Amino acid sequence: MSARGQTIRRLLQLLGCALLACLATVAVAQEIWRVPAPDTGQVVTPGLGAGARGGTNIYRGENPYGDIFPLYMLDSRWLFAEGNVGGLHLVRNARWQFDVIARYRFDQFKPDINRPGDENLQTRKQTTDAGLAAEYRANWGELRAVWVTDAQSRHRGQEFELTYRRGFDRGDWFFAPYLTLSWQDEDLTGYYFGVSPEEAAPGTPVYRPDDAFNAAVGLNTRWMLTDRIFLQGNVAFKVYASSISDSPIVDDSVDANAFIGAGYLFDGPYDRNKRDKLGAGQGLWTYRVNYGYAAEENIFPLLMAGVWEESTEGRTDLVGLTIGRLLRPGKRADVYARLATIRHFEKGLQDDTWSFAGSLMIIGRGYLPWSDKPAFRWGFGWGASYSVDLLAIERIKQANRGDKNNQFLGYMEWQVDVPIDLLFKSKLTRNCFVGASVMHRSGMWGFATFFGDVSGGSDFVGFHVECVR
């Protein structure tokens, strides 16, 4: 292709992305439509990113809304995550794919007590659905069937979807129009669109919807800026059945959805047998034990600046074990996938509990001018954290501020350490480091519905020993 042709193609791609960005500002999505990660040739392709989603709202009196959405991506032989869907591959080959899935449902309704007819209505909450998916791929496109049921016992219903999608590759640009037909049972439609006798009020009569057949048409897009960095844009329109649109708490039968985001794809796990030998301070695995306490300040900027005062709102401690697997080695920094298991000691405020955090961590190394061995390391990671119970420090802080809590939150971590060999030498402590770390659970400032619209979280500061093997 000529230079002029390449320039025209790039301009058209940028125009397409700009159009999707405009759609995302005026329309809001109730689902993040899936776009499979590009084939990088790796057995495992992890990635991180973020985006904005938005859409119109069919509920009575509700304005269009939008929020930000974190992207946790993984595509491996057994596990996968793409947008708001993740799960386990049972069967996967060139034609067929059978999965066990979990999918976040963004549907929700928050009544306004100052709006006539809403005074008795209850909140309809978001939930996590779980179920099975089957997909068949051929030259004419993809046919995907999904069945899910409520895993959190909120709507207690079921949904079945059948989607046809045809993908087209045009160099760095990928787009796929699709059509989805869905069936929702009476329990699901009753929870989100029904009105019970206790909720009835003037202008809001009792309503028990039947099951519903809905239809959606949309477009998935992806543009690879580089081999690793991509932009993603999705837009869709959904038409609801009359059993939903006839509800007294519904104003419309059609909504519009959009999502635009960006992300970075990392290499799969490093293979020692196929790549260069690792140097000092590098290894396939990292093992870290740490102790920490609830901090008074936030990770940005004070904790990273060394202001490590203990919290005055809730004095709690933790101990943790973190295991990391090397994804990409580098001359100055490595990328690891990490999983942390943390025990929280709540000191009488409530029962002790557990939390788990998964993250991608960049660990850099600094050297003295006269040595090829690391003199210090620094690290920063981002991912997600789930606590078995709400943490005491978060209950207290959020209650004092009148804000919400959520067990599932975003996760950030920062650490700095030095080799133990600088203090004393031993075979047992070879490639081991001692230092400080900061752990942060956050709802992304209340802009992420995915994290329950939480604007706060918790911070812990502590000390660790980490060995690289």
Image (cartoon, rainbow, N blue to C red):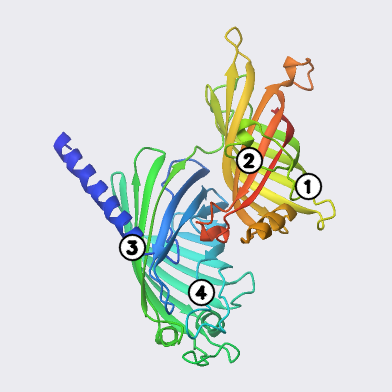
Which of the two discs, 4 and 2, sits closer to the camera? Answer: 4
Q: CA distance from mark 3 to mark 4?
A: 19 Å
Give whichever of discs 1 and 2 has the lower sequence position. 1
Left or right relative to 158: residue 39: left
Left or right relative to 9: residue 266: right
Give whichever of discs 4 and 2 has the lower sequence position. 4
Residue 26: mark in rendering = 3
Q: Amino acid at mark 2?
A: Arg
The residue under label 2 is 338
Residue 315: mark in rendering = 1
Which of the image's four quarters has the N terminus? top left
Left or right relative to 455: residue 319: right
Q: Amino acid at mark 1?
A: Arg
Give whichever of discs 3 and 4 has the lower sequence position. 3
Which of the two discs, 1 and 2, sits closer to the camera? Answer: 1
Which of the two discs, 3 and 1, sits closer to the camera? Answer: 1
Q: CA distance from mark 1 to mark 2?
A: 27 Å
Q: Tell me, yes or no, whether the two marked residues, 1 and 4, touch with CB atoms within 8 Å.
A: no
- Kind of element beneath mark 4: loop
The residue under label 4 is 109
